[in-house]
Image (cartoon, rainbow, N blue to C red):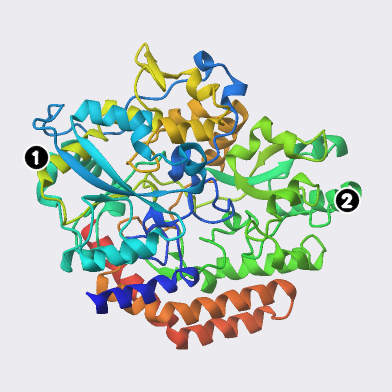
Amino acid sequence: MKKVLAILLAMAMLLALTACGGAAGSAAPAAEASASEAAPAEEAAAEEAAPAEEAAPAEEAGSAAEAAPAEEAGSAAEVPAEEAEPVNVIEYPLEGNPSFTYTVIMRNNVLAMLGDDDFSVTSAYKGICEATGCDIEFVALGEATANEKININMASGDMTDFSVSVGNYAWNMSGAIEEGVLFDFTPYLEEYCPSYKALLDNDEDIRAAATNPDGTISMFVSQAAPVQDKGMIIRQDWLDDLGLEKPTNREDLEEVLKAFKSEKGATMPILTNSGLETGLSHSFNMVFAGLNGVSYQLTEPNGKEVIANFASENGIEYLMYLHHLYEEGLIIDDFMSTGREQGNWESSYYGGKCGVWADGFRELDPANRANAEDPNYRVSALAMTDYECHVSDKSTASMMGQVFLTSACEDIENAMRLMNWCYTEEGIRNNLYGQEGDGYVLEDGKVVLTEKITNNPNGWSLNNALNWYGAQQWLPTCVTLEHWRLISAPESFEALEYFTDAYGDKSMKLPASVALSADDTTEYYSLASDVGTLFAESATKVVTGQLDEAGYRAVIEQAKGMGLDRMTELYQAAYDKYLEEN
């Protein structure tokens, strides 16, 4: 056990240098890190690759309550639009009052509301316990030390029945099963968890997210709406004031950026962070998650050949274009010290330093205008629609809301039945909005949020109210497009629809089911650190002109000798296997 944990810890240390953001098109295996180990979506950098729609209400929810009264705010579908019918129905409440222990991580934003309490005081907790007849006792861990404590408890066997994290085992679920930390509950699904099984059978992305490389299943995952939640944003008030049309290609964008610089005083007209994210990589059909590591994609739509993003012609073109913008003074040296981590991301656009940047759809919420120095601040969604995009981030698989049933559980059948309720119509609503009659009511079969959420008496934002009434911090959730309509300001939801439509398809991304085996994953990570570091350092040099195109192509050849060729072979073999089986 100690040897395995040591290996996994070493792998986890490579996380900062390897790809993240899901199996589809990622250098990371399909068994991604537990969402409980990632920062909550409202605290995560919007320029990073963690799909925000997958965080569901854990993200900053904006001001839908101000934009529309509860009765006009829209309605959420009761069940995911494509949910398959379960093969049998479990009767609730369960007999015998089953009791379970449950490890949760208390995020800082949740602690601000709960204080010394845990989730047992929340509306969703009361809902699930009353409906299922189960009792849940929480073991609450602080955010800063949770991963360390979970690793220690799993090594010693001192585990709870359920946990929102498996620590370093998140990168080796099959190993967790082999070591007796988790178990393969595939044989239990049809009888004890039919609603979850129906969801897995119906959706390839979700099944891929839940399935380990060896075909076992050891976690419950959340369902996300298949949307593109992030894209480029532009200062619409500046466009209107200058009489300019919204650009739809890079040439027109440059002219707009130059006008923003000369007429509006924007010192970095297109905001670029230290990870080289601008929102433009989609227009080059480059799968891009910043400089966190190497990602893999297809060389052409629905193609048969895989390639590392930084080694592709698409990637080279993107970097050279950023260099062009740098030479034109539209990107400046400050990008190397710009980002949410540096504390100067939001101030860059609210303060008028830039006029174009990449962000989540919620930035279109009119409530955010109050954060800007300019009282005329107005923004709109932007996309380079003159180009065909084939690397959309749309996926129904969520990296948030994962739950694990550990080998410590002595009542597996009822534990599975408890989790099954989360995927029923009633459970889905409860986990998003709390108990019926408390956080929401049904009108003509549609959800309408109560004022406890939309106009919270404690003064909580809509986001914090959803975190308290719902259970997205500790239970699986199933999110639909209508859910986003319900909780978003109209302007934000329009941006979400626009991004989803304008950013095309994902036919150049690897299918979600393409994943490396456990052995191949270990080999991959033994090579990925040095290769990822080389690309990260070289890409920045390309932008600043310290490395020309020929020099960068030489770097690619160098990377091949350092292990990139073998990394590509591993992913090509995994993709070839997928093509043979599908």
Compared with 399, 137 (above or below) is above
> In the picture, residue 121 is in which quadrant?
top left
Q: Amino acid at mark 2?
A: Gly
Q: Please state the total of marks drawn on the protein image.
A: 2
Quick one: SS at disc 2?
loop
Residue 79 image offset from top left, x and y in percent: 31, 28
Residue at screen point 16% across, 64% down? 180
Residue at screen point 62% across, 78% down? 538
Q: Quadrant of the C terminus?
A: bottom left
Q: Nearer the viewer, residue 244 or 424?
A: 424
Q: Nearer the viewer, residue 327 or 74?
A: 74
Residue 303 image offset from top left, x and y in percent: 40, 61
Q: Are marks 1 and 2 in contact (CB under 8 Å)?
A: no
Residue at screen point 44% across, 33% down? 468
Residue 459 image offset from top left, x and y in percent: 58, 27
Q: Nearer the viewer, mark 1 or mark 2?
A: 1
Residue 491 image offset from top left, x and y in percent: 62, 29
Earlier along the polypeptide chain: callout 1 or callout 2?
Answer: 1
Q: Nearer the viewer, residue 143 or 117?
A: 117
Q: Residues within 10 Å of mark 2 (few under 14, many from 20)?
A: some
Q: Amino acid at mark 1?
A: Glu
> In the picture, residue 522 is in which quadrant?
bottom left
| Residue that carries the numbered disc 2 in the rendered image | 265
Q: Residue furthest front?
A: 116
| Residue that carries the numbered disc 1 in the rendered image | 191
Q: Nearer the viewer, residue 221 or 85?
A: 221
Compared with 165, 522 (above or below) is below
The mark found on residue 562 in the picture is: none
**Residue 228 appears in the figure:** no
Q: Is residue 202 left or right of residue 397?
A: left
| Spatial CA span between label 1 and label 2 | 64 Å
